[in-house]
Image: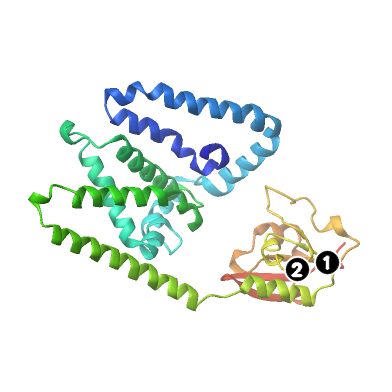
Amino acid sequence: LTVVSRTLCVYLLGVPLLALWGSGREGRRGLWRVYGGVVSVLLLYLLTWYLPHRAELSHMSRYYLTEQILPKSAGSLAANVASGFFGNYRNLFPYLFLHTPVLLILSLLGVAAAASRLRNPAERPSPPEIYLAAWLACGWALLILSSYAPSRYYVTTYPAMAATAAILLGRQFGRDRSSGSPDADARWRTALLTLWLLINAAWLTHWLATLSYSQHEMSRLLSNTLPANSVLIGEAAPGVSMDNRFMVVNVLPGLCNDRQPVERFARRPRYLVIMDGRARKPYWDRFYPSLLAPERRLLAAKVIGWDVGVYRADDAP
């Protein structure tokens, strides 16, 4: 159900296979039940949703795969991997280490501990441990390899991170009390929890202290500046129109509304609201270069750190 409602999680299809196969002969005997259920759900999805809407779904999937997710070359793939480990604050490990380093480190140690016991029949990890480790390994691999992995995608791995960390702590501190010091275990647990709370409190405090309302402010500015019946055209238009009542045309080249979006509304005031500066899409310079003249720019602002430009198009052909 997760996969058919969010194709980003398609990697989860292989996770039960890894968990049951790695848990021994008994686990492998249950594979037919698990994948019988998987096939049943996918068949239901295919018949009731995909086939009736295959043209739209195929168009969208092709766009996201070719334009955003799949690397364009071996060099691009290598750059994705390097960025995932050592890139800017939005990439996988820099982002997780910045926001929740304790949980990240504990989950990494949990995955390593489960992997180290795979070859030991006496301490073989349980199917839930293998499942969680495979969930994290496959999820992180997908996000590292993908050319498009915004920070919101990482939430798909948070449950597995928390559960893996909890299992690790349970195994570490839940051993026979006669072989260790309960007081020392309690101090370790308290120290880890305190560190986790302090780090999360620090970034949450920073977020509150630097909180801005640039989208809302831009939306109100447009409402006070442009005619009431205006049409806002461009990929940045929806994000700055949540607090006004303009007609919005989202233009994503290769996906939607990229065929003469300006010409369709010749009888209404028209404005391009687009990503500007270095983030400007080549589409606009290719099809509407005359509308991007500096004297046509009505507004320029930073919205969530991105340059957004508003250009007059009301007298365009």
Secondary structure of the residue carrying tag 2 is: loop
**Mark identifier at residue 165:** none
Secondary structure of the residue carrying tag 1 is: loop
Q: Earlier in the sequence, mark 1 or mark 2?
A: 1
Q: Is the residue 141 above or below the residue 19 in the image?
A: below
Image coordinates of residue 150 in percent, x first then y, are 50, 56
Q: Is residue 16 left or right of residue 69?
A: left
**Is residue 107 among what the camera can see?**
yes
Q: Which one is in front, 271 or 229?
A: 229
Name the front one of labels 1 and 2.
Answer: 2
Q: Is residue 78 left or right of residue 40?
A: left
- Viewport quadrant of the C terminus: bottom right
Question: Disc 1 marks which residue?
Answer: 230
**Is residue 296 among what the camera can see?**
no
Asked if labels 2 and 1 touch by Cβ distance under 8 angstroms, the answer is no
Q: Which quarter of the figure has residue 192?
A: bottom left
Could you tell me the amino acid type at mark 2?
A: Asn
Colour pattern? rainbow
Report the residue at 44% width, 49% height from top: 143
Image coordinates of residue 273 in percent, x first then y, are 72, 66
Question: Disc 2 marks which residue?
Answer: 244
Q: Residue furthest right?
A: 267
Number of dots carrying numbers: 2
Classify 10 Å Cα crowding around label 2: few (below 14), some (14-19), many (20 and above). some
Q: Which one is in front, 176 or 62?
A: 176
Report the residue at 42% width, 45% height from top: 139
